[in-house]
Amino acid sequence: MADQHPGKPRRLRTSVRGPLMFSAFWAVIAFLAVVIFASGGSARAPRFDLAFTAAGIAFIVTLVVAAMLAMSHKENAEHLGKGSGVNLSSARKPSHGFGAAPGPQDPPADGTDTRGGH
């Protein structure tokens, strides 16, 4: 909210129009689906009561979900966009005690165990 200026249009994230249009779209889809499928055929009257109920529920649920997603949005910190990234170097990394120890990986040719075993 701090980046808004009077007289200038709001950004898409802070605008109310986007989530309302998104919710209205899904409300219309729910209305049409229930009017078509809830009547049970063309010989019966359409169920507008169920259609309006489904449209209202779809509108409210999608509006709440869109509002929660908009509130949870957070820009990345500025320092995350700089630098060379993680593990881009081809240099050998220390094992830190996990995995194989650095050094030759082939067993000795004479069959002796270098780990202290028999």
Image (cartoon, rainbow, N blue to C red):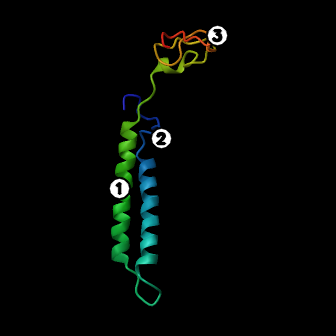
Q: Pointer 1: what residue?
A: 61
Q: Provide residue 19's location: percent of width, then percent of height.
A: 42, 49
Question: Who comes first in sequence, dot 3 or dot 1?
Answer: 1
Q: Which residue is mark 3?
A: 110
54 vs 105: above or below: below
Q: Which amino acid type is marked by label 1? A: Val
Q: Which residue: 34% across, 63% down?
A: 56
Determine crowd level at label 2: few under 14, some 14-19, many 20+ residues with C-alpha closer than 10 A: few
Secondary structure at numbered mark 1: helix
Q: Nearer the viewer, residue 43 or 92?
A: 92
Q: Nearer the viewer, residue 13 or 109?
A: 109
Q: Residue furthest front?
A: 118
Tell me the element at label 2.
Answer: loop
Q: Residue at x 51, y 19 (%)?
A: 99
Number of the label disc, if any, that sits on residue 12: 2
Image marks 3 and 2: residues in contact by CB distance under 8 Å: no
The x, y position of residue 108, in whole percent, is 63, 11
Between circles 3 and 1, the one closer to the viewer is 3
Image quadrant assignment for residue 110? top right
